[in-house]
Amino acid sequence: MSQLIEQSRSPLVEQPLKTSAATGATLACMGLADSIPLMHGSQGCGAFAKVYLIQHFREPIPLQNTAIDHIAAVMGGDDNLSQALQLLCDTHQPKLIMVMTTGLTEMQGCDLDRVIREFRQQYPQYQQVYIVPVTTPDFVGTMQTGFADAIQACVKQMLLHNPIDSATALAKRNNQQLNVFCSVALTSADVELIEHYCGAFGFSAIMLPNLSLSLDGHLAEQDYSVTATGGTSIKQLADMAYSAANLVVGPSMSSAAHVLEQQCGMPSYHLGMAMGLAETDQLILILSRLSGKPVPAWLSRQRKRLQDSLLDTHFLLSNSTIALALEPDAACGYSSLLSEVGAQIKLVVSTLNSRSLKQINAQRIIIGDLSDLSQQLGSIELVVGNTHCANLCEPETPVLRAGYPCHDRFGNSDVLQVGYEGARARLFALANLLKAYHQDEVPAHVSAYRFGPEQTLTNQQ
C-alpha cells in the first residue's frame, strides 16, 4: 500500500534533523582506501562536517578544505581548488581525491569538471590520481543523497579511467565475485557482517564503500594518517566491472549500481536494508541461488535464534507505539524490523521525500524536523533516532540511538543492525529500553470477580 507523505513547510527550523550532503560525501570517501576528502568552500563548511563525524566515530577525519575567503567568494575560487589539488598530490600522494562543493561554491557557479580538466592538462604527472567531483550543495539533498552521489561518482570515474564495454565485461566475468553497494545507514559492523555472509557462500565481496576497514575503531600504526586508513582499494574499484552481480543494500544506492548495469550489463539485486527476518532471508536466498550452494548450518541456527528473540520480545514490543526520526534508508530498515514484531509505527519523521518511504506501514509520515516529533511525544512509548532526538525526548520517552550523529554513546561503529544477528540485537535493545522505563512485559490482569476489603466488610454487615 502506498503511504501518504506530508511535507512540513515551516519557515523556521528550530530542531533540525537533516545533515548536509557534503558530510555524507565525506563519510563515503572515508570508505575508500588511500583517499582524501576535499571540500571546496569556506573553512567553516569543512569544520562542521569534520567535527560532526569525529564526535560520532571518535576517530580522526582527514578532511581538507580549499579555504575560500571573502575575496575568492566574490572573484571565484578556481585557483584555490587547483592549488589545493596540487598541494595534496605533492605532499600526501593519495590515490583518490574526492572534491565536494558547498552552498557557497555552488552559488558561484563553480564548474568542477572544467577546473579538474584544466588541472589535468597543467599537471600531467598526476594522471594516476583519481579525482572524483561530486556536487553537494548545502541547500539540496541530505547526508544520505551526498553519500550515494559520491559512490555513484566513484563508479563513473572508475569507468572513465578503465573504459569497458558489456561484451568485454561479460567475457571476463568472475562468477565468484560480487559488488555490494552499502547505504549510509549501515554501520561498520553491518558492512563486516554482510561481507561475512557473502564469504559463507564462497563469494569474494567488493564492499563499496567499505567503512569496516577504516572507521571500525582500530588503532592505526601511525599517530595520524593524511588519508583514509582503509576501505575499498583502487584495484577493487577497477575489478567491479567484472563481478557476477550487484547486491544493493539500501534503496538510495540503486543509482550507483545502475551505472554498472548500463555499462557492463551486470544484474542487480535490491535487498532493502537487510534488516529483519524477511529481508535477511531474501539476502541469503539470493546468495544461495547465485552460488548454487546450500545455506550453511550456522546461518540456519542464527535464523532460529532470531525467531526465538521475536517470540521473547513480542510480549513487550507488539502493540507498543513507536516513532522513527531517521533518514529514509534507515527508516525503511527499522520499519521492516518493527512490523515483524508487531509494533505500531505511529510517526515517521524523515529528511527527504524518497520513493522508498511510501512502502513504510506507519500511521503518519512527515518530511520535516524534530519539532514535528515533539508535538506527538505524549502518545509514543519509544523513539528511534539520533542524539539530538534524545535531547528532545528523554527522560520522559526513551530513545534507541540510530543514525547520525550519536555523540553521547561509545561504540557506534560496533552497533549491529542487519542480518539475523543484527535484528536480534536491535530487538533486545528495544525491549530492554521499554523495560527500563517501567513497562511491564505482560500487563497485570484484574479479574471481574475480584473484591476488595471494603466489599468484604459490607457483606459481613
Image: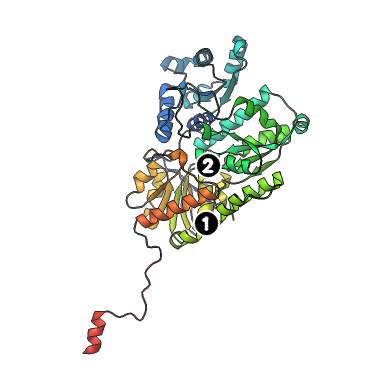
User: For residue 206, which numbered disc appears in the image?
Assistant: none
Q: Dot 2 surroundings within 10 Å: few (below 14), some, or many (20 or more)?
A: many
Residue at 37% x, 62% y is 440
Taking the view exactly as shown, the residue that stands out farthest to the left is 461
> Residue 245: percent from the left, percent from the top?
69, 39
The kind of residue tagged 1 is Ser
Q: Tell which tag, 1 or 2, sits nearer the viewer.
A: 2
Q: Which of 60 and 38 is in front in this view?
A: 60
The residue where tag 2 is placed is: 190
> Residue 9: percent from the left, percent from the top?
45, 43
Q: Is residue 220 above or below residue 407?
A: above
> Residue 287: percent from the left, percent from the top?
66, 45
The residue where tag 1 is placed is: 339
Q: Is residue 161 visible?
A: yes
Total labels drawn: 2
Q: Is residue 142 visible?
A: no
Q: Is mark 2 on a helix, strand or loop?
A: helix
